[in-house]
Image (cartoon, rainbow, N blue to C red):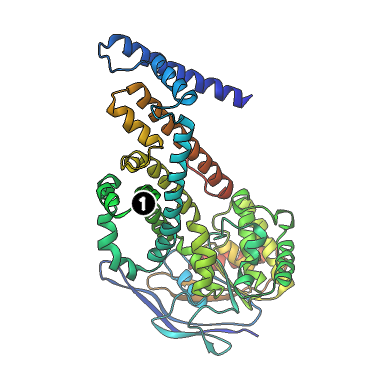
């Protein structure tokens, strides 16, 4: 069980010039256990800030984020994150990169290896376990980053525009694979994107944020069974519905 | 094939250089301006018979090489840990900055009189070369620690790594290429200090000593031999270290311009 509850979240920054900027205002949101939620919005709407708060990398100015009723104040072993960039350690092989989190958690060598290989297989990188990141394509590196986050078996997986830097074709392929992994692993996923198409294709629930100050504009439940067809009329309808107010 | 081409090209470059040297020599009236032929003769003399004390060029070079190595190793042993410590602890750096920053601008040559008074034997040489090596290694190690990618540190944090774990598994490996480059620079400056170190006297062996001895006699042919030999050995050592860097840090791709 891992339910995420955001309660009256406000976040403001002071810029270098001393101006006060409100990044997030009155965010109230509940993300149910095992659901796939997408946060969409233009750049500057605070979606990444919200995600980083969930990861314990930032704290709200007021309000609280709780996981199963427990407030998140620091990074949490139950919460894994995939960043926009792959952030792999360049001196490690793909396999030892995937083992990295397990190593920090002091998981034994044999189990570490076994779990890393399992998740490498899941993301389709079994044949590249001994390669170094610089030998791989962008899509493969991002898959390795996903495997690294999954290997620690977090209950909540946060993803910050993980496919943003990929070409259109690889991006679609990665979306398909993510859904496959989601259906197999059934973890809670919070996925940040600026693409409405991507959000509607992936999510159970799309949370639309509006910028300056960042607040929740609407929450749309996507009632289309998976696997979804990107061009199916009901999918297109949802996209249109969200786009109108976007 | 590629190798043969490279050797051919290098030989050609050297031949052009020697030809130019010979040309300038034949237009110069000075008796001190030595010719390539005289330098070759001196080199032959120095390797087969030895210098005025009967010490061969090889022995002079080896002796100096081990002195450099001695000071260089000390430079690494002291510079890397201190650089890591000061890189990680900005508080300690603030305290030591007023000593370290001015000290690194004092040329090793300026330390020679102090070294003569306070040290003796091999320690004198090692100290001067250590000075040349220590500061480049210290500074590059510190900047290596500072250049650690914040985003990688964050990855470690999301996996709840302890500070010690993150230093060991993120900071150290990512500053290793900087440290290696610093060591290479340090070896270069260490070599460059050998003449200064051997000016101290005492021992009669050493390539720097040999240069000083022949310099006093205005035997420039032998001086030039010493210079070339120092240059070449430094070049080969640098190439070896560069090769090691490429081997150990293949992810550090250099930008080609």
Q: Can the viewer see residue A7 in this picture?
A: no
Is residue B161 left or right of A129 when viewed as pictured?
Answer: left
Which residue lies under the disc numbered 1?
Answer: B127
Considering every residue shown, the one lying at the far top of the view is B26
> Horizontal and vertical percent for residue A108?
69, 74
Which residue is more in the foreground, B35 or A145? B35
Classify B102 as above or below A213: above
Is residue A240 left or right of A44 when viewed as pictured?
Answer: right
Q: Can the viewer see residue A112 in this picture?
A: yes
> Horizontal and vertical percent for residue B14?
45, 20
Q: Residues within 10 Å of mark 1 (few under 14, many from 20)?
A: many
Which residue is more in the foreground, A116 or A72? A116
Is residue B172 left or right of B33 when viewed as pictured?
Answer: right
Q: Chain of mark 1?
A: B
Which residue is more in the foreground, B239 or A192? B239
Q: Quadrant of residue B89?
A: bottom left
Considering every residue shown, the one lying at the far front of the view is B53
Is residue B53 left or right of A138 when viewed as pictured?
Answer: left
> Horizontal and vertical percent for residue B91?
33, 71
| Location of the N terminus of chain A (image quadrant) | bottom right
Classify A95 as above or below A13: above
């Amino acid at each position: 069980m891992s339910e995420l509850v955001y309660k009256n979240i406000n976040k403001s920054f002071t810029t270098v010039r001393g101006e006060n900027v409100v990044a997030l205002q009155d965010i109230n949101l509940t993300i149910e256990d095992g659901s796939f939620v997408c946060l969409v919005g233009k750049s500057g709407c605070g979606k990444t800030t919200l995600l980083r708060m969930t990861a314990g990398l930032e704290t709200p100015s007021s309000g609280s984020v709780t996981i199963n009723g427990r407030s998140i104040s620091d990074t949490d072993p139950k919460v894994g994150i995939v960043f926009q960039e792959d952030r792999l350690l360049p001196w490690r092989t793909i396999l030892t990169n995937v083992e990295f989190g397990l190593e920090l958690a002091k998981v034994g060598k044999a189990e570490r290896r076994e779990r890393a290989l399992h998740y490498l297989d899941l993301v389709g990188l079994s044949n590249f376990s001994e390669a170094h990141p610089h030998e791989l394509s962008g899509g493969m590196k991002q898959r390795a980053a996903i495997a690294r986050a999954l290997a620690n078996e977090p209950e909540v997986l946060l993803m910050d525009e993980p496919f943003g830097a990929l070409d259109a074709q690889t991006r679609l392929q990665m979306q398909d694979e993510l859904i496959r992994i989601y259906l197999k692993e059934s973890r809670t996923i919070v996925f940040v994107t600026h693409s409405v198409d991507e959000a509607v294709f992936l999510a159970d629930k799309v949370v639309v944020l509006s910028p300056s100050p960042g607040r929740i504009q609407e929450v749309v439940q996507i009632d289309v069974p998976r696997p979804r067809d990107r061009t199916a009329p009901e999918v297109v309808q949802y996209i249109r519905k969200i786009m109108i107010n976007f | 094939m590629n190798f043969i081409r490279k050797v051919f090209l290098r030989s050609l470059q050297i031949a052009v250089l020697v030809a130019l040297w010979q040309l300038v020599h034949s237009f110069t009236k000075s008796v001190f301006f030595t010719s390539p032929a005289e330098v070759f003769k001196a080199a032959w003399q120095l390797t087969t018979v030895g210098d005025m004390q009967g010490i061969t060029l090889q022995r002079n070079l080896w002796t100096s090489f081990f002195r450099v190595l001695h000071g260089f190793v000390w430079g690494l042993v002291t510079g890397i840990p201190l650089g890591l410590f000061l890189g990680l602890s900005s508080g300690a750096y603030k305290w030591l900055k007023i000593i370290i920053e001015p000290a690194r601008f004092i040329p090793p040559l300026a330390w020679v009189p102090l070294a003569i008074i306070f040290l003796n034997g091999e320690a004198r040489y090692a100290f001067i070369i250590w000075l040349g090596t220590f500061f480049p290694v210290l500074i590059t190690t510190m900047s290596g620690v500072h250049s650690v990618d914040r985003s990688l540190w964050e990855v470690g944090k999301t996996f709840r790594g302890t500070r010690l774990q993150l230093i060991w598994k993120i900071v150290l490996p990512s500053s290793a290429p900087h440290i290696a480059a610093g060591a290479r620079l340090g070896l270069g400056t260490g070599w460059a200090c050998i003449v200064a170190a051997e000016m101290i006297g005492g021992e009669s062996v050493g390539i720097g000593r040999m240069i000083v001895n022949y310099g006093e006699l205005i035997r420039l042919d032998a001086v030039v031999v010493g210079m070339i030999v120092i240059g070449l050995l430094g070049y080969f050592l640098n190439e070896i270290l560069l090769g090691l860097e490429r081997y150990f840090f293949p992810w550090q791709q250099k930008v080609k311009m």
